[in-house]
Image (tube, rainbow, N blue to C red):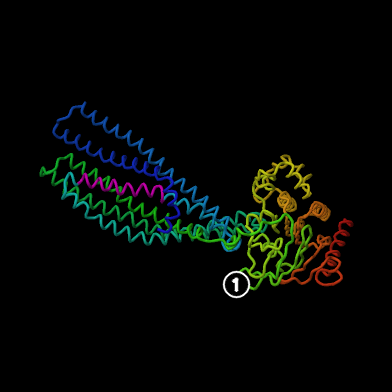
Amino acid sequence: MKSFQLILPYFQKNRLIITAGIVCLIIVDFLQLVIPRIIKSVIDDLTTLAISPKGLLIYAADILLIAVLMGGFRYLWRRCLIGMSREVEEGLRSRLFFHLQTLSAAYFDQTRTGDLMAHATNDIQHVRMGVGMGMVALTDAIIMGAAAIGFMLYIHVRMTLYVLIPMPFIVFGTRFFSKKMHQRYQDVQAAFSDLTEVVRERFTGIRMVKAHHTEALETRRVETISREYIRQNIRLVKITSSLFPMMMFFSNISLVLILFLGGRNTILGKITPGDFVAFISYLGLLTWPMMAMGWVTNLIQRGKASLDRIGRILERLPDVTDSADVSTATHLKPNGSLTFEDVCFAYSPHQAPALDGIHFTVAAGKYLGIAGPPGSGKTTLLNLIPRLYDVTGGAICLNHQDIRKIPLTELRSRIALMPQEPFLFAGTIRDNITFGDPRFDETDVIRAVQQAALYETIQSFPHGFDTVVGEKGVILSGGQKQRIALARCLIQSPALLILDDPISQVDSETGNAILQTLHATAGSCIRIIVSHRLSVLKSADMIIVMDQGRIAESGTHAELIARDGYYADTLRLQEIEEELDGYERGAV
């Protein structure tokens, strides 16, 4: 019942359409029930030889008219009910996607993409089937079943009661099997998620698979998970394949009773031959509702299992949200400082802190450089500023205001973050830079790519800014992808520019040109740059060196050289490497 609340708004919104669809469905059901009455009259008239060819044509015309009416009303109920189920599918998928975007980064650290894809496709499809065809089959089972029984009672009460003897067995059997089906549907959906994730990973990493010649190994891995998916489906089929034969068995028992009792009553003259044929026809119509009960159970259990899975996601709340007093917070000023006040952070209570006691201040228009060995907490520090994660101790302040008291939309609108591994969507270069934002025109795009030292490269492409980059920017080099991601940040003219190793994949000359442009056009923008290439940080107003989640060194470039610690040692090694590289290139 709790899961049903997820789709209740769609029923309320479309209640008139649903009502119209059900009315049309009921009309079709009753029209179907009229046909056996016509057949009864035809057979009785033929038995007594009291009908002419013209009379047969009239009966045939009646059936033809009913068929036309049934076709028209069947179109209407399918348009209303199946169309409504498609709206439920679209609305639920949009709601799921919107909700997923509100969840914090920590959720996606723990959740596989394949699971989310399964929820957004397979699960929602099963909900649609349960809502659409499930409603149709349930209405048919109730209306046609009740009406068919009513007509049968009209023909012969005792014979009808005998025919209904197997029905309780069908009801109890359906309830017994439905309990088992629900859990097995859950298992099938979980196996489908696993299969989706495995296949997605292999296709995403297909170039790596080919490079290492592991096609046979990966095929075996996919086959293993595919066999598990088949195994779970077979476990489910063992239940569903028992349910339908059971229902057919009891339906055929009813047919046996009709043939014996109905035939006997016809011989004794208690019912006419037409009544006997009509009774068998109504039993045939009653068989569908009896079968529909099994199909409805199948659809609803599968839909409920999927709806439960979707419901668990929609119940998940984001870890990072606006605080209760955010509405009373003072809005951000255009310019201001960034301060870390004894900041601590751990990804979970059971893990050691990724950051511990971080304290520094960067004034407006200043450049902060961050260095340190891999795993020292540099990227974690950057992710805390736009509140991808929230600090577990201390505070981060913009303009002397705790960022947890600033509306998330306002905070993030002032920040541009370029991650260490830039991601490109499979659209055009223009789309990847602007995200389709109508605020940015051609002048803005050109300015951003010029600052990222990419304008000449893009001009060399046949389609310029309209060049389609392919999945994850497959047609571009690493340096080109990195500079497009940089242009995406620069086009926003942010108050706070955060770059995680922004020129690691470009040559020194291009990197220096980018840095000079950044500094020349910075204005009051705070720039925070993480770089393993320490020469990038020479012009920083302040440099902090991270080590095991703490600030090991801080100061200007000259101060850190004089201190002769990690920064100075690493810089000397990099300068030696650059000299050797230059010597080798010259020798070649």
Magenta span includes 142: yes
SS for callout 1: loop
Estimate the x, y position of residue 420 in percent, counting from the top left.
Answer: 71, 59
Judging depth in this view, the residue of 504 and 388 nearest the camera is 388
| Residue 34 drawn above or below residue 283 | above
Q: Answer left or right for 141 relative to 82.
A: left
Magenta span includes 473: no
The residue that mark 1 highlights is: 349
Estimate the x, y position of residue 366 in percent, counting from the top left.
Answer: 79, 59
Q: Quadrant of the C terminus?
A: bottom right
Q: Answer left or right for 411 relative to 122.
A: right
**Quadrant position of residue 28:** top left
Estimate the x, y position of residue 251 in percent, counting from the top left.
Answer: 26, 51
Q: Quadrant of the N terminus?
A: bottom left
Q: Report the magenta residues as a range.
A: 130-152
Evaluate whether residue 227 shows in this view. Answer: no
Q: What amino acid type should be assigned to the residue bearing mark 1? A: Pro
Magenta-drawn stretch, dominant element (helix, strand or loop):
helix
Estimate the x, y position of residue 282 in percent, counting from the top left.
Answer: 24, 44
Q: Answer left or right for 527 relative to 218.
A: right
